[in-house]
Amino acid sequence: MKLVGIAGTVEDKSYNKILLQFIANHFSRLVDIEILGIEDIPMFDQDNDQTNSGAIQYLNRKISGADGVIIATPEHNHTITAALKSVIEWLSFKVHPFSNKPVMIVGASYYEQGSSRAQLNLRQILEAPGVNAIVFPGNEFLLANVKEAFDDNGNLKDDKTTAFLESTLQKFLKFVKVINTMDQASGGNDDAADSEDLNATGKISTTIEDVDMAADDWVEKAAEKVHAVDGNTYVKLDRGLLTVDQLNYFLNSMPIELTYADSNNQFIYYNKMTDTKKMLAPRRPGQVGDPLSLVHPSGLLRELSTSFTP
Amino acid sequence: MRKYIGLVGTNTKQSTNRQLLQFMKRHFKKQAEIELIEVSGLPMFNKPQDKQVPARAIEIAKKIDASDGVIISTPEYDHAVPAVLMNALEWLSYGIHPLLDKPVMIIGASFGSLGTSRAQAHLRQMLDSPEISARVMPSSEYLVGHVLEAFDDQGNLTDKDKVKQLDALFADYQQFVEISKELWHTLKVDKEEVKKIDAEDFK
Ligand SMILES: Cc1cc2nc3c(=O)[nH]c(=O)nc-3n(C[C@@H](O)[C@@H](O)[C@H](O)COP(=O)(O)O)c2cc1C
Ligand SMILES: Cc1cc2nc3c(=O)[nH]c(=O)nc-3n(C[C@H](O)[C@H](O)[C@H](O)COP(=O)(O)O)c2cc1C
């Protein structure tokens, strides 16, 4: 996973820059964070479109290519800086790299409130339709009285604060995974959906090779090939032990139709909770193993967003 | 006759928010003098260590100082005030504080139907911050939605109800300015408070 980090300031000396650098260094074993500067971005001006300038295209590319974004915001006059707002305006004008991007907000300020108002405001801006980011809910990280917070090496002095930051970051990483999974399942943005390989011609580590995907007895053949267990055999799960029978009982009694398509776009499971005819999105037993192109006639791709993909 | 500054919260040449202020200037010319001021052209606020505020910002500050009140017209970008207006307010609260206790009226025009309601709330919040501490007229909001159809060729608001609403609001604002002049007790305390904040923000 790869994140980019932006400190919402153009000052050389900034506590928010120090905070972001600390996050990138201290948690490098958890995630790779590349820090992007916004110093070269001019004031947004509708009449003088700079979208194609090197500086804006650089941010556009980096943000588009990242799995998620962390923004560290100062607070000026109860809101974010004009410098950061200008960047967001450029990136919601002709290009929209924040669209569907998971974003975590953190912030440091001199006073007790620790950028709480700026963070709230930034959230509202990021959720505006032209920006369309997916802001990590709850989990505010506010660093108040920041002038006393760091030691000379730019490390947070208070271990409890560091621990809290780590747990917040870990939750965000999970959030990023979930959001990007949903995004993949729905085909991401529309052009991505067009180019996606729904014929499952690729291969991922769990693909069972040399079994005809389209065959009605794919499940039986594939099971034989990998020696899949069934019946009263125990399976160890996170967290617990169930027999395959218990697992089936559990999944089939769910009040929702679950569909599992792997990231190679092969349909490999559904919970056979009821007859095909009674299902909202009808699945036939013989379809399991099929590439998605056979399961979903092209027009039905949207329906996938309600299914479940790893 | 009272003298007001009309702050144009955008840098685009074709702006309905500028048009709205121009309309007010003409429409109320018998009741008050309104001078329009542009906020564009300032460098990006970067909290300069030498505390030097650009000459243009000082010029705007002087005009605001000399006025009886400020009318700010804001577009809405991404549910908030445009960066260019935010930037001007940052400069106007860094060592200089021309808006301190100034009576302010907020107006705004947008292409959509909501007429900058969110940007206006955002602006109100900024003007309430201790660094600015303006005196924003309470419970007043002048929103012009669907603004592309709102003006005729002469730049006059076509909707009679909208004009009536503006007349009433402006009359209230004039009154508000008078009342504010009586509220001078806090001014000295506020000035001392803002000095303390400056000392903190400059560090
Ligand atoms: C980057 C960008 C974001 C915008 N976001 C909004 C918005 O959130 N709400 C809205 O009503 N209009 C939005 N607009 C359209 C506004 O430009 C328009 O409604 C504005 O308030 C008109 O003011 P003006 O004629 O003075 O420029 C946006 C425009 C741009 C360029
Ligand atoms: C014009 C101006 C306005 C400020 N307004 C606020 C404010 O409303 N709330 C606040 O906590 N700090 C305010 N500050 C102080 C700090 O800039 C702020 O706490 C900031 O988040 C520190 O982060 P930084 O070192 O990354 O710039 C203001 C500073 C300036 C220069």
Image: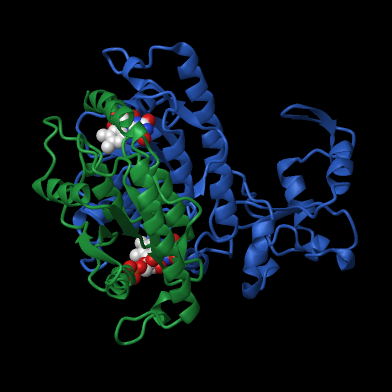
Chain colours: A blue, B green
Visible in this render: residue A310?
A: yes
Q: Residue furthest left?
A: B55
Q: Is residue B33 above or below residue A260?
A: below
Residue B171 location in percent, x, y? 41, 63
**Relative to residue B140, is residue B12 drawn left or right?**
left
Residue A146 position within the rendered picture, expressed as x and y whole percent measured from the top left: 35, 21
Quarter holding the N terminus of chain A is: top left
Residue A63 vs residue A300, the one in the foreground: A63
Tell me the quarter of the picture where residue A149 sits.
top left
Instruction: Using the image as rendered, state which of residue A105 and residue A23 is in the foreground.
Output: A105
Q: Quadrant of ligand 1?
A: bottom left
Residue A74 visible (yes or no): no
Taking depth in this image into account, of B54 and A212 the one nearest to the observer is: B54
Q: Nearer the viewer, residue A118 or A191?
A: A118
Name the residue at 55% across, 55% down.
A184
The image quarter containing residue A267 is: bottom right
Name the residue rendered at 41%, 32% in the picture: A115
Residue at 36% x, 63% y: name it. B75
Q: Position of residue B121 (x, y in %)?
A: 46, 52
Residue A29, image x, y percentages: 43, 25
How many numbered markers are drawn?
A: 0
**Residue at left offset 33%, top offset 68%:** B17
Left/right of residue B101 with respect to residue B64 in the rendered view? right
Say above or below: A34 vs A87: above
Residue A33, placed above or below residue B149: above
Residue found at the far bottom of this picture: B153
Drawn side of residue A131 relative to residue A263, left or right: left
